[in-house]
Structures are given as C-alpha cells and as structure tokens.
Amino acid sequence: MIEFGTGGWRAVIGDGFTRANIRRVAAALARRMVREGTQNQGICVGYDRRFLSREACIWFSEVLTGESVRVYFVNLSCPTPQVMFTVKHMQLPYGAMITASHNPAIYNGIKLFTRGGRDASEEYTQAIQDEANALDEGSIRSIDFQQATASGMVQFIDPRDSYLDSILAQIDTAAIRRHRPRIVLDPMFGVSLTGLQTILYTARCDLDVINDRHDAFFGRHLPAPNPETLVDLQAAVRDHNAAVGIATDGDADRLGIIDEKGNYVSANEVLVLLYYYLLEYKGWRGAAVRNVATTHLLDRVADAYGQKCIEVPVGFKHISHGMDTYDALIGGESSGGLTVRGHISGKDGLYAASLLVEMLCVTEKPLSQLIQELYERFGEMHMAQYDWMMTEEKKAWIHQKIMIQKELPELDAPAVRVSYADGCKVYMENQWVILRFSGTEPCVRIFAEADTMEHAKKLVACMAAFVNLSLPEQP
C-alpha cells in the first residue's frame, strides 16, 4: 500500500516503490488536476541521483500526460528545493520530486508540492494516497515518454540559472568576496555540487570537494549529514585548513556543518546561529518556527529580541504553514532543514549553506567563536536523540502505553505540561523529552534537551527504559 508520511511517500525499491505504485500516485494526482481544471497549467517534475529516480520520473510523467496533464520535466538530476522554486517561479499549481531524501539507499519515493512551491499538506497527501490505493491498474492511461515529448505534452526545462540567481540575489556576495574563505564541500554523492559550486565560485570562495561522484549507494553510508556520516568531511576541513565544511543530504534540502577546527556543528546550533545572525547583525525582525523535536534555545533568542517562537508538529509542511501564518523570519528543524523569509517555503540546503558562509564573512568571526558567543549570551542547551527500528507489534504496544493510556516515566523534574499533539512531549523547567514515531521510517525516536549532553542522555534513557528500549552501547 502507498502511505505518505511527514516527508512524502517513501518505500523500499522493489517492495512498495514499484512501477505500478508510481503510476497509481501519478494517476491520482493527474485526476485531481483534471477535476480542478489545472491540467493545462502543468506540473514541474524532477529527480535526484538515487537508483531508478530518472526512470521513475519518466513512468510518472507518462501517466500524467496520459491523463491529459502537461509536464515540465527537469532533464538533469537536481536538488529538491530547485523543483520547489520552479513551481513558485513558474506559478504552477503542482510539483513532484522523485527522491527519498536522507533515507537509506534501498528507498526511493515521491515528494509533492503545491502552488507557491509549498510541501503538500497532510489533507492533500491523504487524499492522493487514498485515491491511489483504490485505483485499478487497468484504468490508468499513459503515453509513451518519447511520444509525449514529441507532442509537446512533456517539455524539458533547465531552471538552474533562475534558482541559483535567486539565491545569489539574497546573499551578500560582496562580503564573501572580500574574505574568499576556503570551504570543503561534501555533497554526500547527491545533487548539490553544481549549485553550491556555482554560488560559491561566483562569490570567489576557494573550494575543495569530496564525495562528489554519482553513487546510488551513497558510499555505503546513510545520505544524511550527521556526526557518524561526516567523518571524512571533518578530516578534510583539518587537512585543508578550511574555514568551514559544508555537507548536504541526498536531495540537498538539509545541511550539515563542520567548523574550522573540524568539529561537528549540530543542526540545532546552525538554526539558532542563523536566526541570531539575522536579528543581531542584519537587524531583521520576525518570529521563528520550529517543530516539537527542535531546540528551545531558539525560543530564548526570540524572546531576547521581543519575538515569538512557534512550535509545530514534525514535517516541514507545518513549518511552512507557520512561516506563512506568522510572517516568520526563520523556520527549521533539528534534522538540518531550514528556510528564511523571502526564499522558498520549503527547506533548502544550498540557500542555508550560502547564508552561513555570508555570516562568517560579515561577522569576521570563526564558526566556533560564534557558537561560543551564542552560548555566553543565551546559555547552553544540548540535545540527545536515539532511534530504534521496530516491528509493528512493538510499535502498537508503545503507542497503547504512551498515547492511549498516557502513562509517563518518573523523570528527574516535575512536568510543567505534557503534549500529545505529535508523539508524547514532556516539558520541564529548562528541559524536555519527547517520544514519537517516525513518519518516514519504521522506527521510534526519543529526543531530549537539557543544559548538558549527559543530562539529556539521562532523560532519553529514562523514557526508553519505560517502554523497554535500551540505549546502544557507546564505542
């Protein structure tokens, strides 16, 4: 069965991610467009470097055209935010990206976007999911890709220049040119290299690159920028005496950062630093939006400048909605995605990376010093996160215990409040812990934040033990 989660539909290749299911999703989307009368306005479709991504995009397009929908086909593998930008720039009603983002290499999937380049809402994806699962394969119409191209129903486009020019127009390239920082890029075998090279070379940066070849197995690592996967980048930053190391996930909508000393900078720190930079150094104002599993240090920074911090469920569509509702300045999540007012509504690793390089050059401070400055002004908060893969039976047992019976462990501080809006989050004075089920993988996640990493890990361990889970032994 096709099942959309917080980041689109993702499934194991050859199991759930099959040609038949791809065609069902395309048919459900196309028929919705026909009912709305938007089929002639068209849809932008793109794909990343994963196994079968281009082929899946072709299968997807064949059904769209067979159901009378015009297709604008990005004819080179590209970042997800480029497709989102193109939907906005061309004023299209819909967009689609063939990707499984940061999931393991055996996965692929489809992300859907609506007018303005926004992540499709849960109401929308649920309707597509239900209609797709109910479709009979024999009822789906399609046109051969070559025939659809010849007839003009499929038009090849290359929107890179418009997308990259949009980012360059929002970045202080003059400040970057004055400093010409040395940067190491790690696209993690994904699709960010051409775009980031273009932006940073234009700003006269000196670049070194690792992990840039096309490898559908992502070097046999998870294509997610985290401390475990960025060991090579850490070494390269030290070897090249670089100002910063920049990594992006498989479809380039998430960011990972290594400071000038070769230390990993968490996504929470990057998000808070950029918000602080926009408020303190650029003088901008606006609320911040974060999900339930993202640092509360963002709240402290917002409060210090008389701004609000809005909490939403996990899923960037909720952050995008919050950005629109509150005309927020920045929105982000602890997994490395963020967006800033004036750009696209979705997360963009290329834009975030460019803004971070600008920050280093405008402030004329190394990244480690900026982080220290942040902690000296607002205090330290550290987050621990652990994931557990599990069976449906185990998941159901935990759901019953935590979400239905609402049982809670005995924590080391009294609860100020408890929220069940997205998992179970227990708020305490200057600390919190949350248990929630992933919307993209068959696993449960526990996050906690406190004044020290040791304290945060203890909170995770307490919640984990309460549902009969053990923390993995540290190497």
Image (spheres, rainbow, N blue to C red):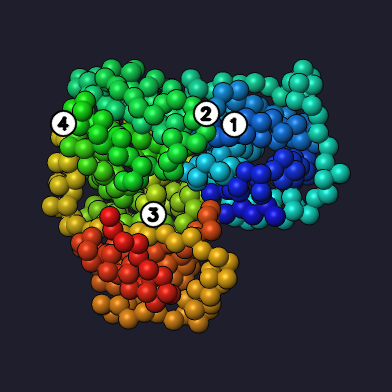
Q: Amino acid at mark 3?
A: Arg
The answer to which of 448 and 274 lies nearer the viewer is: 448
How crowded pointer 4 is (Cα within 10 Å; few <14, some 14-19, many 20+) is rated as few
Per the image, the residue denoted by label 4 is: 364
Q: Is residue 168 left or right of residue 373?
A: right
Quadrant position of residue 432: bottom left
Q: Amino acid at mark 2?
A: Cys
For this orientation, the residue located farthest to the right is 138
Q: Amino acid at mark 1?
A: Gly
Eye-nearest disc, 1 or 4: 1
Task: Check contact, mark 1 vs mark 2: CB within 8 A.
Answer: yes
Per the image, the residue denoted by label 2 is: 78
Eye-nearest disc, 2 or 3: 2
First reached walking from the N terminus: tag 3 or tag 4: 3
Q: Residue at x 55, y 65 (%)?
A: 391
First reached walking from the N terminus: tag 1 or tag 4: 1
Per the image, the residue denoted by label 3 is: 290
Element at badge 2? Answer: loop
- Taking 300 as reference, is 91 above or below it? above
The spot of residue 440 in percent (x, y) is 53, 53
Q: Residue at x 26, y 36 (%)?
A: 234
Task: Check contact, mark 2 vs mark 4: CB within 8 A.
Answer: no
Q: Residue at x 50, y 73 (%)?
A: 398
Task: Check contact, mark 2 vs mark 3: CB within 8 A.
Answer: no
- Taking 429 as reference, is 259 above or below it? above
The spot of residue 57 in percent (x, y) is 65, 33
Task: Check contact, mark 3 vs mark 4: CB within 8 A.
Answer: no
Per the image, the residue denoted by label 1 is: 46
Q: Amino acid at mark 4?
A: Glu
